[in-house]
Image (tube, rainbow, N blue to C red):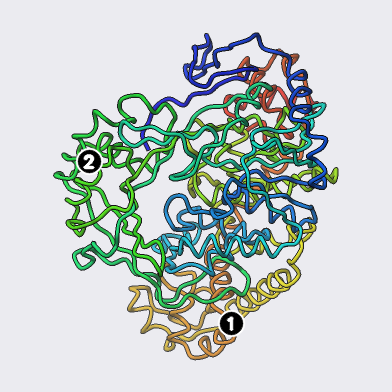
Amino acid sequence: MAGGHQRIFTGHQNIKLQKTVPLRTNSPTKFVIKKINAPVHCRDAINRVSTMNGGGTIKKMFPTYDIIVVGAGHAGCEAAVAAANMGSRVMLVTMNMNTIAQMSCNPAMGGVAKGQILREVDALGGYSGIVTDHTMIQFRMLNLSKGPAMWSPRAQSDRMQFLLKWRSMLEQNERIDFWQEMVTGLVIKDGVVRGVRTGMGVEIPSKAVVITSGTFLNGLIHVGEKTFGGGRSGEKASKGITEQLASLGFEYGRMKTGTPPRVDGRTIDWDVMETQPGDTEPSKFSYTDTPKLENQVPCHITYTSAEVHDILKTGFDRSPMFNGRIQGMGPRYCPSIEDKINRFAERDRHQLFVEPEGRGTCEVYVNGFSSSLPEDVQYKALRKIRGFENAKMFRPGYAIEYDFFPPTQLKMSLETRRIKNLFHAGQINGTTGYEEAASQGLMAGINAHLAVNEQEPFILKRSDAYIGVLIDDLINKGTDEPYRMFTSRAEYRILLRQDNADIRLTPIAHALGMQGLEQRMERVHEKVEKAKEVEKFFRQTSVAPEQVNTFLATKKSAPLKQKVKVHGVLLRPHVTLNELAQHIEHISDFTKNYDTETLEIAEINMKYEGYIKKEQEMVEKMNRLEGVKLRENFDYKSVVSLSAEAREKLTEIQPRTIGQASRISGVSPADISVLLIFMGR
């Protein structure tokens, strides 16, 4: 949504969120909460929290869980599943059992770069891809006109079926228990989290806690001049966690996001809009045997107009975005309609995607029309959009403002630096998007299990996965706006394609001890071997001019003068494996024995072999720096040759390797040279 300054706060005991005073600092966006009483030492606060509410009696209600997951959104569900399937006993605490895995925003999974993340989550044993395949109503592979590094799967989902399927899969896992209540604080002893405390004074003991609070921490919903507490429409905000963590010295800030109005599809004129059908041969997200999509539901496209914009502008004076009531930073790449009008004043229309919420409902999501303007202004403008002339609104759009904790306060495992065995995942880390949240939840769940079993953390490198890029960016660079993944953020994207996520990551998850991956491993081995068979055939089989020249002429490609290997023909621009199979009989006979997925990955390996090799060489060079370990709690301030900014950032983040240090914002190549010399390299 709209721009604005992100607010960062530093913690003190006994705080008021509403009153802030500026700090004198180099950063213009830092604020400190106004203190009511003098601050107390963090250890005193820790000990006091651990003895509140008479937890000794209530603890008898529960065993000591290995891991408690706070929040049951996309991050929380994946965290619970990952930890349970690693062997931990998990308690999933949510304020509402009926909204587990709720799609709070648009009813879709995947998209540019997000689709790659979702396939990686599946390859590591997560459930989001499986749930999506079971509940999607449309599938499209985006960016097919570009190279395979850019291909991104996206599915339109049935919102209600999605959450029902997720809940069903969670309930089938005997290692996961559930508790419906608000978590208002953590039980902490000697700097280690020992459980959670709820609003009714119930203490649930555990060895680790994963917080996946989404937009619920002190959430405020804005519609025009109206503001009310809530973590989502119709649901109350979560109180207590921010205040406690702030008292323990954590910095936190405010971010915002938004959602568009929901409309009655029975009142829309679909015939005047552009139809956006799904793929003729729809694929899927999961590498398991999920059902094939049948009877796809189309989406539609329409546009705003200058008249629509003029109506929306009449509400700008009552907009919380423009009158300063919203202080948090919104997502740059998913702005509200009023923000788009304001930032792109030269444009007289904006594209809208009209997306069905499911097969069994007439509710429609108007993607691209997010707004926090007064509901009467939203309604008037909506009915001036082509196709919406008689539309009825189910509910207006709104903006939501919520607390987050800058992710630079985390280790690469997503464990907090201040409190042992406490993990953060999802929007609490400043990200936006279901897929980004799910991937963090999965990684936090795995690492929480490893932590309580005193094992080394599981860290994905930037060359391993988009998930590795995401977490590396968050920890080392931080974010001053809701972070969204793009293919451009990944420097090794030809290696991190959506088609090979299982080959890259399933063996790693299996070696970690993730349960239920035996059949997946067999599929991975079979896929790799069959792809090699296809590549071998194309490199060894010849084709004569008379077999292929007619086809090459249609592609405006030079004719053959003699026999060549089929591999050489395939390397020509605009020539595909599927087309060669259609025009050359012996190739067709061979490829009939292989599925589309195998043929696709073999073709990519052959056509992009040079690019793949170059990126692998780049990875090997970077891995040399990743192999140079840095001591934990190293005193960077003693290295006077480092720049002042580098000393500050390195002390704050405490990188594990030289490679990680090189990616920290504010650490220059000269600083890295100093570190290498200091270490005798």
Q: Is residue 366 visible?
A: no
Q: From this view, report whether residue 519 is shown above or below residue 546.
A: above
Depth check, mark 2 against mark 1: the one in front is 2
Q: State the residue lying farthest toward the right.
A: 454
- Residue 217 in which image quadrant: top right
Question: In which quadrant will I find the C terminus?
Answer: top right
Residue 406, position in %: x, y?
58, 30
Q: Is residue 254 visible?
A: yes
| Left or right placement of residue 127 versus residue 159 in this view | right
Q: From this view, report whether residue 654 is shown above or below residue 637.
A: below
Residue 584, position in %: x, y?
46, 87
Residue situated in front as seen by the camera: 339 or 209: 209
Residue hosting label 2: 377
| Left or right placement of residue 569 versus residue 619 in this view | left
Give the secondary structure at mark 2: helix
The residue at 58%/24% (across/down) is 666
Crowd rating for badge 2 (residues with CA inside 10 Å; few <14, some 14–19, many 20+): many
Question: In which quadrant will I find the N terminus?
Answer: top left
Give the secondary structure at mark 1: loop
Residue 234, position in %: x, y?
45, 45
Residue situated in front as seen by the camera: 106 or 111: 106
Residue situated in front as seen by the camera: 170 or 460: 170
Residue 517, position in %: x, y?
73, 66
Mark sitting earlier along the chain (2/1): 2
The residue at 53%/11% (across/down) is 23
Residue situated in front as seen by the camera: 119 or 557: 119
Residue hosting label 1: 594
